[in-house]
Image (cartoon, grey):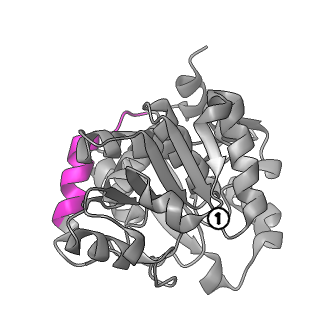
Amino acid sequence: MDELNRLSDPGQSQHFLTGLLGRDIQLSRSPQMHEDEAHAQGLDLVYRLFDFSVLGMNEQDLPVFLETLQASGFSGINVTHPYKQAVIPLLDELSEGAARVGAVNTIAFRDGKRLGSNTDVTGFAESFRRGLPEAAMDVVFQAGAGGAGAATAHAMLAMGANKIVLYDPQEARAEHLCDALRQSFGIERAQVARDIASDITRADGIINATPIGMAGHPGVPFPTELLRPCQWVADIVYFPLQTELLRHAEAIGCAILDGGGMAVFQAAGAFEIFTGRPADGHRMRKQFLARSDGALE
Protein backbone atom coordinates (compact mmCIF):
# COMPACT_ATOMS: atom_id res chain seq x y z
CA MET A 1 0.00 0.00 0.00
CA ASP A 2 1.32 3.41 -0.88
CA GLU A 3 2.30 5.05 2.40
CA LEU A 4 1.46 8.61 1.41
CA ASN A 5 -2.00 7.66 0.18
CA ARG A 6 -2.65 5.70 3.34
CA LEU A 7 -1.65 8.59 5.57
CA SER A 8 -3.21 11.28 3.40
CA ASP A 9 -6.72 10.00 2.66
CA PRO A 10 -9.05 12.32 4.59
CA GLY A 11 -12.17 11.07 2.83
CA GLN A 12 -14.35 13.27 0.66
CA SER A 13 -14.43 16.33 2.91
CA GLN A 14 -13.56 19.69 1.36
CA HIS A 15 -13.39 21.38 4.79
CA PHE A 16 -10.22 21.05 6.85
CA LEU A 17 -9.23 22.18 10.33
CA THR A 18 -5.45 22.19 10.74
CA GLY A 19 -2.78 24.06 12.65
CA LEU A 20 0.69 24.27 14.17
CA LEU A 21 1.72 23.24 17.67
CA GLY A 22 4.91 24.61 19.22
CA ARG A 23 6.46 27.40 21.28
CA ASP A 24 7.18 31.00 20.24
CA ILE A 25 5.51 30.57 16.86
CA GLN A 26 3.52 33.80 16.54
CA LEU A 27 5.50 34.86 13.45
CA SER A 28 5.02 31.53 11.68
CA ARG A 29 4.03 31.77 8.02
CA SER A 30 2.39 28.35 8.05
CA PRO A 31 -1.19 29.67 8.27
CA GLN A 32 -0.73 31.79 5.15
CA MET A 33 1.07 29.05 3.23
CA HIS A 34 -1.59 26.43 3.88
CA GLU A 35 -4.60 28.71 3.54
CA ASP A 36 -3.28 30.35 0.33
CA GLU A 37 -2.72 26.95 -1.28
CA ALA A 38 -6.14 25.73 -0.16
CA HIS A 39 -7.77 28.84 -1.64
CA ALA A 40 -5.93 28.29 -4.93
CA GLN A 41 -7.35 24.76 -5.04
CA GLY A 42 -10.88 25.77 -4.03
CA LEU A 43 -10.69 24.13 -0.62
CA ASP A 44 -11.97 25.44 2.70
CA LEU A 45 -9.04 25.13 5.09
CA VAL A 46 -8.44 26.86 8.41
CA TYR A 47 -4.93 26.78 9.89
CA ARG A 48 -4.50 27.88 13.50
CA LEU A 49 -1.47 28.55 15.70
CA PHE A 50 -1.31 26.80 19.06
CA ASP A 51 1.58 28.54 20.79
CA PHE A 52 2.19 26.84 24.12
CA SER A 53 4.21 29.87 25.26
CA VAL A 54 1.14 32.08 24.81
CA LEU A 55 -1.29 29.47 26.12
CA GLY A 56 0.77 28.88 29.27
CA MET A 57 1.05 25.17 28.48
CA ASN A 58 3.96 22.73 28.42
CA GLU A 59 4.88 19.21 27.37
CA GLN A 60 2.72 17.66 30.08
CA ASP A 61 -0.33 19.17 28.38
CA LEU A 62 0.29 17.41 25.06
CA PRO A 63 -1.86 14.29 25.68
CA VAL A 64 -5.02 16.21 26.56
CA PHE A 65 -4.35 18.81 23.86
CA LEU A 66 -4.09 16.21 21.10
CA GLU A 67 -7.22 14.49 22.39
CA THR A 68 -9.06 17.80 22.21
CA LEU A 69 -7.96 18.49 18.63
CA GLN A 70 -8.91 14.99 17.55
CA ALA A 71 -12.33 15.23 19.19
CA SER A 72 -12.89 18.66 17.61
CA GLY A 73 -12.69 17.30 14.08
CA PHE A 74 -9.20 18.44 13.11
CA SER A 75 -7.76 16.80 9.99
CA GLY A 76 -4.30 17.10 11.45
CA ILE A 77 -1.69 19.27 13.08
CA ASN A 78 1.87 20.30 12.35
CA VAL A 79 4.40 20.06 15.17
CA THR A 80 7.47 22.22 15.63
CA HIS A 81 10.08 23.04 18.30
CA PRO A 82 10.30 21.64 20.92
CA TYR A 83 7.74 18.83 20.54
CA LYS A 84 8.73 16.89 17.40
CA GLN A 85 10.01 14.01 19.47
CA ALA A 86 7.83 14.44 22.54
CA VAL A 87 4.64 13.68 20.57
CA ILE A 88 5.83 10.29 19.33
CA PRO A 89 4.67 8.23 22.36
CA LEU A 90 1.22 9.80 21.92
CA LEU A 91 0.76 8.51 18.36
CA ASP A 92 -0.73 5.26 17.08
CA GLU A 93 1.46 4.85 14.02
CA LEU A 94 4.51 6.39 12.34
CA SER A 95 5.37 6.60 8.68
CA GLU A 96 8.57 4.83 7.68
CA GLY A 97 10.35 8.17 7.32
CA ALA A 98 9.25 9.46 10.72
CA ALA A 99 10.26 6.22 12.41
CA ARG A 100 13.68 6.34 10.76
CA VAL A 101 14.30 9.98 11.69
CA GLY A 102 12.78 9.67 15.14
CA ALA A 103 10.82 12.92 14.83
CA VAL A 104 7.35 13.95 13.68
CA ASN A 105 6.32 17.28 12.20
CA THR A 106 2.90 16.27 10.85
CA ILE A 107 0.11 14.38 12.60
CA ALA A 108 -2.97 13.21 10.69
CA PHE A 109 -6.16 12.23 12.54
CA ARG A 110 -7.73 9.33 10.62
CA ASP A 111 -10.40 6.85 11.71
CA GLY A 112 -9.79 7.49 15.38
CA LYS A 113 -6.02 7.13 15.06
CA ARG A 114 -3.08 9.53 15.15
CA LEU A 115 -0.63 8.97 12.32
CA GLY A 116 2.76 10.69 12.45
CA SER A 117 4.85 11.69 9.43
CA ASN A 118 7.95 13.75 8.75
CA THR A 119 8.01 16.13 5.79
CA ASP A 120 11.04 18.06 7.09
CA VAL A 121 13.49 15.66 5.42
CA THR A 122 12.10 16.07 1.93
CA GLY A 123 11.44 19.75 2.56
CA PHE A 124 15.05 20.48 3.48
CA ALA A 125 16.41 18.32 0.68
CA GLU A 126 14.34 20.11 -1.95
CA SER A 127 15.34 23.51 -0.60
CA PHE A 128 19.03 22.52 -0.57
CA ARG A 129 18.97 21.18 -4.12
CA ARG A 130 17.42 24.41 -5.37
CA GLY A 131 19.38 26.85 -3.25
CA LEU A 132 22.86 25.31 -3.10
CA PRO A 133 23.01 22.99 -6.13
CA GLU A 134 26.82 23.03 -6.45
CA ALA A 135 27.64 22.85 -2.74
CA ALA A 136 30.52 20.66 -1.62
CA MET A 137 29.37 18.04 0.88
CA ASP A 138 32.42 16.06 1.94
CA VAL A 139 32.16 17.17 5.57
CA VAL A 140 29.13 19.00 7.00
CA PHE A 141 29.01 20.50 10.48
CA GLN A 142 25.56 20.69 12.05
CA ALA A 143 24.50 22.53 15.19
CA GLY A 144 21.40 20.94 16.67
CA ALA A 145 20.44 17.30 17.13
CA GLY A 146 16.79 17.59 18.03
CA GLY A 147 13.80 16.81 15.84
CA ALA A 148 14.67 19.27 13.09
CA GLY A 149 18.34 18.31 13.28
CA ALA A 150 17.49 14.65 12.81
CA ALA A 151 15.62 15.56 9.62
CA THR A 152 18.35 17.76 8.14
CA ALA A 153 21.08 15.23 9.00
CA HIS A 154 19.17 12.39 7.35
CA ALA A 155 18.53 14.60 4.32
CA MET A 156 22.20 15.54 3.93
CA LEU A 157 23.48 11.98 4.14
CA ALA A 158 20.76 10.75 1.78
CA MET A 159 21.82 13.45 -0.69
CA GLY A 160 25.40 12.21 -0.63
CA ALA A 161 27.23 14.07 2.13
CA ASN A 162 30.25 11.97 3.06
CA LYS A 163 30.19 12.80 6.78
CA ILE A 164 28.16 14.92 9.17
CA VAL A 165 29.60 16.22 12.44
CA LEU A 166 26.97 16.87 15.10
CA TYR A 167 27.06 19.45 17.87
CA ASP A 168 24.37 19.93 20.49
CA PRO A 169 24.64 21.52 23.97
CA GLN A 170 22.95 18.33 25.17
CA GLU A 171 25.74 15.97 24.15
CA ALA A 172 23.63 12.89 24.85
CA ARG A 173 21.20 14.04 22.19
CA ALA A 174 24.02 14.39 19.66
CA GLU A 175 25.27 10.92 20.59
CA HIS A 176 21.79 9.45 20.14
CA LEU A 177 21.35 11.00 16.69
CA CYS A 178 24.86 9.95 15.69
CA ASP A 179 24.07 6.33 16.58
CA ALA A 180 20.85 6.44 14.57
CA LEU A 181 22.60 7.90 11.52
CA ARG A 182 25.35 5.28 11.68
CA GLN A 183 22.75 2.52 11.72
CA SER A 184 21.09 3.95 8.60
CA PHE A 185 24.10 5.16 6.62
CA GLY A 186 27.25 3.52 7.99
CA ILE A 187 29.57 3.99 10.94
CA GLU A 188 31.93 6.41 9.17
CA ARG A 189 29.17 8.78 8.04
CA ALA A 190 28.43 10.52 11.35
CA GLN A 191 30.37 11.66 14.40
CA VAL A 192 29.86 13.89 17.42
CA ALA A 193 31.81 17.15 17.53
CA ARG A 194 34.67 17.10 19.99
CA ASP A 195 36.43 20.36 19.06
CA ILE A 196 33.92 22.85 17.68
CA ALA A 197 36.53 25.28 16.36
CA SER A 198 38.39 22.58 14.46
CA ASP A 199 35.23 20.83 13.27
CA ILE A 200 33.71 24.02 11.87
CA THR A 201 36.94 25.15 10.24
CA ARG A 202 37.40 21.92 8.30
CA ALA A 203 33.78 21.61 7.18
CA ASP A 204 32.60 22.38 3.65
CA GLY A 205 29.33 23.68 5.00
CA ILE A 206 27.43 24.40 8.18
CA ILE A 207 23.78 23.84 9.10
CA ASN A 208 22.01 25.55 11.96
CA ALA A 209 19.27 23.14 12.99
CA THR A 210 18.62 24.84 16.32
CA PRO A 211 15.99 27.49 17.13
CA ILE A 212 18.76 30.00 17.88
CA GLY A 213 18.26 33.01 15.66
CA MET A 214 14.48 32.64 15.64
CA ALA A 215 12.29 35.42 17.04
CA GLY A 216 12.25 34.67 20.75
CA HIS A 217 15.64 32.92 20.58
CA PRO A 218 18.09 35.61 19.37
CA GLY A 219 21.78 35.03 18.83
CA VAL A 220 24.02 32.56 17.00
CA PRO A 221 24.59 28.86 17.72
CA PHE A 222 28.41 29.14 17.63
CA PRO A 223 31.09 31.86 17.27
CA THR A 224 30.74 33.28 13.75
CA GLU A 225 34.45 34.14 13.58
CA LEU A 226 35.01 30.43 12.94
CA LEU A 227 33.39 30.68 9.49
CA ARG A 228 35.44 30.85 6.30
CA PRO A 229 34.40 32.58 3.03
CA CYS A 230 34.65 29.34 1.03
CA GLN A 231 31.97 27.64 3.12
CA TRP A 232 28.20 27.52 2.71
CA VAL A 233 25.85 28.12 5.62
CA ALA A 234 22.24 26.90 5.81
CA ASP A 235 19.73 27.88 8.47
CA ILE A 236 16.39 26.21 9.18
CA VAL A 237 15.03 29.33 10.89
CA TYR A 238 12.72 31.37 8.68
CA PHE A 239 11.28 33.98 11.01
CA PRO A 240 13.28 36.06 10.43
CA LEU A 241 14.51 34.88 7.05
CA GLN A 242 17.88 36.53 7.50
CA THR A 243 19.15 35.41 10.87
CA GLU A 244 22.15 36.89 12.61
CA LEU A 245 24.14 33.81 11.57
CA LEU A 246 23.27 34.28 7.90
CA ARG A 247 24.06 37.99 8.03
CA HIS A 248 27.54 37.26 9.37
CA ALA A 249 28.09 34.44 6.86
CA GLU A 250 27.00 36.51 3.87
CA ALA A 251 29.13 39.45 4.99
CA ILE A 252 32.32 37.39 4.74
CA GLY A 253 31.37 35.83 1.40
CA CYS A 254 29.77 32.51 2.33
CA ALA A 255 27.01 31.08 0.15
CA ILE A 256 23.86 31.04 2.29
CA LEU A 257 20.53 29.23 2.38
CA ASP A 258 17.71 30.62 4.51
CA GLY A 259 15.00 28.51 6.09
CA GLY A 260 12.23 29.71 3.80
CA GLY A 261 12.62 26.91 1.26
CA MET A 262 12.46 24.17 3.87
CA ALA A 263 9.40 25.83 5.41
CA VAL A 264 7.61 25.91 2.05
CA PHE A 265 8.42 22.41 0.88
CA GLN A 266 7.71 20.73 4.22
CA ALA A 267 4.40 22.61 4.23
CA ALA A 268 3.63 21.29 0.75
CA GLY A 269 4.11 17.73 2.01
CA ALA A 270 1.99 18.36 5.09
CA PHE A 271 -0.76 19.96 2.98
CA GLU A 272 -1.06 16.77 0.95
CA ILE A 273 -1.30 14.68 4.10
CA PHE A 274 -4.01 16.94 5.55
CA THR A 275 -6.11 17.25 2.39
CA GLY A 276 -5.23 14.34 0.13
CA ARG A 277 -4.46 16.89 -2.60
CA PRO A 278 -0.96 17.44 -4.04
CA ALA A 279 0.32 20.94 -3.30
CA ASP A 280 1.93 23.14 -5.93
CA GLY A 281 5.32 23.76 -4.35
CA HIS A 282 6.35 26.31 -6.96
CA ARG A 283 3.18 28.34 -6.34
CA MET A 284 3.63 28.11 -2.57
CA ARG A 285 7.24 29.29 -2.81
CA LYS A 286 6.23 32.20 -5.04
CA GLN A 287 3.48 33.23 -2.63
CA PHE A 288 5.80 32.89 0.34
CA LEU A 289 8.40 35.19 -1.21
CA ALA A 290 5.78 37.69 -2.34
CA ARG A 291 4.28 37.90 1.13
CA SER A 292 7.69 38.11 2.81
CA ASP A 293 8.94 41.02 0.67
CA GLY A 294 11.43 41.99 3.34
CA ALA A 295 8.89 41.90 6.15
CA LEU A 296 10.76 39.19 8.00
CA GLU A 297 14.24 40.52 7.42
Who's the residue at 44% across and 30% down the image?
160
Q: Residues within 10 Å of mark 1 (few under 14, many from 20)?
A: many
Q: Position of residue 106 (x, y in %)?
A: 58, 48
Who's the residue at 64% across and 64% down the image?
168
| Residue in front for this viewpoint, 39 or 230 | 230
Who's the residue at 30% across and 49% down the image?
37
Q: Position of residue 274 (x, y in %)?
A: 51, 43
Q: Considering the image in quadrants, where does the N terminus appear?
A: top right
Would residue 96 be seen by someone viewing this image from the given angle? no
Residue behind mark 1: 168
The kind of residue on which mark 1 rests is Asp
Q: Main secondary structure of the magenta part?
A: helix
- Residue 60's quadrant in the figure? bottom right
Asked if residue 49 is among those painted magenta in the image, a careful observer would answer no
Asked if residue 284 is among those painted magenta in the image, a careful observer would answer yes
| Residue in front for this viewpoint, 102 or 54 | 102
Total numbered labels: 1
Q: Position of residue 119 (x, y in %)?
A: 50, 42
201 lies above or below 58: above
Q: Is residue 36 left or right of residue 34?
A: left
Who's the residue at 35% across and 79% down the image?
244
Q: Considering the image in quadrants, where does the C terminus appear?
A: bottom left
Disc 1, SS: loop
Q: Is residue 69 left or right of residue 51?
A: right
- Residue 23's quadrant in the figure? bottom right
Q: Which residues are magenta?
A: 277-290
Would residue 270 be seen by someone viewing this image from the given angle? yes
| Residue in front for this viewpoint, 224 or 88 | 224
20 lies above or below 190: below
